[in-house]
Image: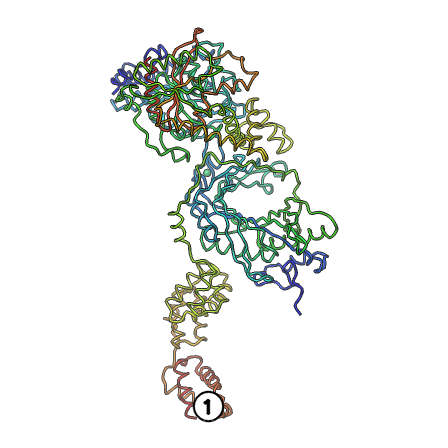
Amino acid sequence: MAERYTQKGVPGPNAPENTLTIPHLRAAIASGAASAGDVVGQCFRSIRERDGEIHAFLSLCEERAREQAARIDGMAAAGDALPPLAGVPVGIKDVLMVAGLPATAGSRVLEGYVAPYTATAVRRLEEAGAVTLGKLNCDEFAMGSSNENSAYGPTRNPHAPDHVPGGSSGGSAAAVAAGMAVASLGTDTGGSIRQPASFCGVVGLLPTYGRVSRYGLIAFASSLDRIGPLTNSVRDAATVLGVMAGEDPLDATSSAQPVPDYCGLLEREEGVNGLRIGVPAEYFGEGLDPEVRAAAERALDGLREAGAEIKSLALPHTRFAVPAYYLIATAEASANLARFDGVRYGYRAPHAASLSGMYRETRDGGFGAEVKRRILLGTYALSAGYYDAFYKKAQQVRRLLAEDFLRVFGAEVDAIVTPVAPTPAFKLGEKTEDPLAMYLADIYTVTASLAGICGLSVPVGCSAAGLPIGVQVLGTHFDEETVFRVGEAIERG
Amino acid sequence: MQPTPSPLGHQGSATRKEGEDGLVNFAMATASVLPPEILFKYEPVIGLEVHVQLLTRTKAFCGCANQFGAAPNTLICPVCLGLPGALPVLNARAVEFATTAAMAINAQIRETSVFSRKNYFYPDLPKGYQISQFDKPLAEHGWLDVDTPERGRQRIGITRLHMEEDAGKSLHDGVHDSATSTSVDLNRCGTPLIEIVSEPDIRTPDEAYEYLTKLKEILLYTGVSDCNMEEGSLRCDANVSVRPRGQAQFGTKAEVKNVNSFRYIRAALVYEIERQVELLEAGERVVQETRLWNAAEGRTFSMRSKEQAHDYRYFPEPDLPALVVGEEQQARLRAGLPELPEARRARMVAEYGIAAQDAHTLTATRAFADQFETAAKAARSPRRVANLVLGELTSRLKLANLELAQSPVTMAGIAQAADLAEAGELSSKQLKQLFDTAFANKEDFGPVYAREKPQQISDSSEIERMIDEVLRANPKQVEQYRGGKKAVAAFFVGQVMRSSKGQANPALLNALVAKRLESE
Ligand SMILES: [Zn+2]
């Protein structure tokens, strides 16, 4: 099994160099060439060497990780069958609960909060043998595109430390890109896995809404939030998804749709020959950086050469996506973040004179500027007299956007390829003064978020300045398989 | 002359039967100085919002026990505590109960209803929002027919029934440091509730009381709630306004909250109506506001307006898919609906030939009615069972302060006693003695009867001898009989029964007396 993985699952020229993938690792541990303990030790050495500068991790759990690794090594020594993620060192975005570990969501309001239970996605990873290294930095409550909104300081891009890693799963992307973890979990509400994956040169998957349980994910916008892997290869993303996907009795929005054997299917499929790939004109218009455009076109050329049919198509409601996204996401956030009130846990403002004073001071002192901006925006969108004009209208746009996609998937195309972000990674501080510009940069990613479909960010090379560039593959609901097929073809170059 | 009907539904001190509960005192405590003719110028308009806790084993959205009275903050989990990352999952049983209740109040079930978030900050609301239903509730357009003292039978519309979760409880008193801090008990958080909102169809406090009584009776029958007001499993808020009689437009309403018994609701409405009439008579305006009932003072108080300026910012709950109660499930639940009290009473009157008032008493609870019907079906004369239950059983239960379920005499015992009495094998005096013994010994009727089977005289010659004796001793009555006053036979039967110390077989005695008198 591991042998076959090493043959077909090896990343091609478009994949990041000098990376360790899950099949390599698993084979090494199974054959005794390496121990899980060694691998975990190597990760912590990398973290000590590099993370002072990168700041991907907010907390580490080395002792716990070594115990997990020792269990895997015990199994390997006993000749037991190894689970699919045996000894795979992972980092977990700090919006996900791991019992006994801190869970700050990058916010002051949860400073010192220790999770009393474990998120379903993390539990499934650990039950499959993954070793948790620690919790990863992110924009506060996953609100941001640069990781500069973390209350604990920004993460830096491992490829260019004066540049942002993207966000909000910037720590998750940087940790994998810097070789400090083999895989990580991020969350994506409007692009928060795909965009940092693109900026850091790793693979990032947005699973279909409902594919992965959200139980244990600190909610930003419940109808948009998704948990997905960031990895060094498409095959690794498929492996991690296969482990954590599936219905969860603790999440009423998780889907009962059966989970296919993604890796098995990738083994059998013959590339992208005969697949119809759509290219929506709306994603290649004004504001797109020429190098990003060129990278996407390179990827499309590769797909054409591999036998795919490239078709242009129209997704006419794309231009309404960013405003609709920011209304729906902030409306839901305004309610989701109401629980951080200082009453039961987390930060409570000292010396408040009254109940309303305690609420006001706790939330004023506990939340950062971007979070407060979004709570205000969302509260406004839901307020009496504005609901119809904002929230309701945004929901209508959301339906139209989803219809755009559903009309073309199946009938016209099997997958869609677009840029991930208009530009490669930008410099720290470059956009912090202009929140609107930051929002507008989400244009290519929020559409899939609103439509609930799946998407993948795959590296396609670097800019002249050496900054990674990714391309986005979109597929219809629960068709991660096709997205992986296209992603692997792009990866092979 | 008919007394002028009071707009409050009170006619002086005349309280209704259910009102033997201190209402008179309330009426007096809150009686205004307004003369009845002033009050009668105005018509009250009342709508009620009733919150009912459902009797599910677990809470609405998590697996915690749904139970009253546990130590504070012991029935909690990440979901009902609103911990970061926790998600609600709807309790299917709660949906069944809510749907059943909706059907019982004649409401139309919405096949696809939607949960919404109702946003507000309060320490006993851990998520900062309550999961409720807003523009697409589970059921709408229901009604109850209520018998009202002044207006006869009235159909009170029910606007909607929706599902929601309960909040926790703020404990302001009796806890450590209560002077400087408030403690919160979150056990109640996530308890499944239904809210039943009536149309503003109610016109008097008595009608409100009747509506609530009927609603509670129905809910108890369906078994979806224990409707225990003291434990808060049934709570009621009232919207009340007054308008000049004949005016179509509603007056400005006040919402009265914090009322924890039906009689307080009636008292609060009486008070509130008079308060509003007084304002209008004085040329002032009623302010739209929430008012809290203070039972100790017998009046309502305005909540500070700051606390009621709420914009709840409802929006669809993204953590829960739309709730679908499909045709098949509706049919199954409808089939499982119990016979409701009113229909049951009508059937019992027809089937057993019992009086309407007796049927009312016998259907006070579903368990009581079930028990009665078991005995009625087992016995030869259902009417005699009814008489025994109402005459012999209930009074003794009341005296011994026992619930029906705790009664030493079972319904099987009642049926046996009824059959014995019907066959004339027991006199009513003997029956009473046996019941007394059963209650004294906490035994069922059967064993008491077996042991103390009264010596019954069934020897015809002996009874004939006693009849002759009685006739001899009462020549005047014999003369009356001969004069055509046949009813005097009952007198002879009674006298013989007395001289036999109640042991003469009543059936035989009756027959022999009749025979003997014929020969006169
Ligand atoms: Zn709970």
Q: Nearer the viewer, residue B450 or A463?
A: A463
Left or right: B460 with respect to A372?
left
Identify the residue position indicated by label 1 in the image: B471
Dot 1: within a 10 Å radius of its alpha carbon, few (fewer than 14), some, or many (20 or more) residues?
A: some
- Image vertical order of residue B167 relative to residue A180, above or below: below
Picture quarter with the C terminus of chain A: top left
Residue B104 on image: x %, y %: 46, 53
Residue A202 on image: x %, y %: 39, 15
Residue A331 on image: x %, y %: 53, 30
Left or right: B337 with respect to B150?
left
Q: Nearer the viewer, residue B188 or A472?
A: A472
- Image vertical order of residue A18 relative to residue A411, above or below: above
- Image vertical order of residue A30 relative to residue A18, above or below: below
Name which quarter of the figure residue B5 lies in: bottom right
Residue A126 visible in rendering:
no
Name which quarter of the figure residue B445 lies in: bottom left
Secondary-structure class at tag 1: helix
Name which quarter of the figure residue A130 lies in: top left
Q: Chain of mark 1?
A: B
Amino acid at dot 1:
Leu
Q: Nearer the viewer, residue B426 or A150?
A: A150
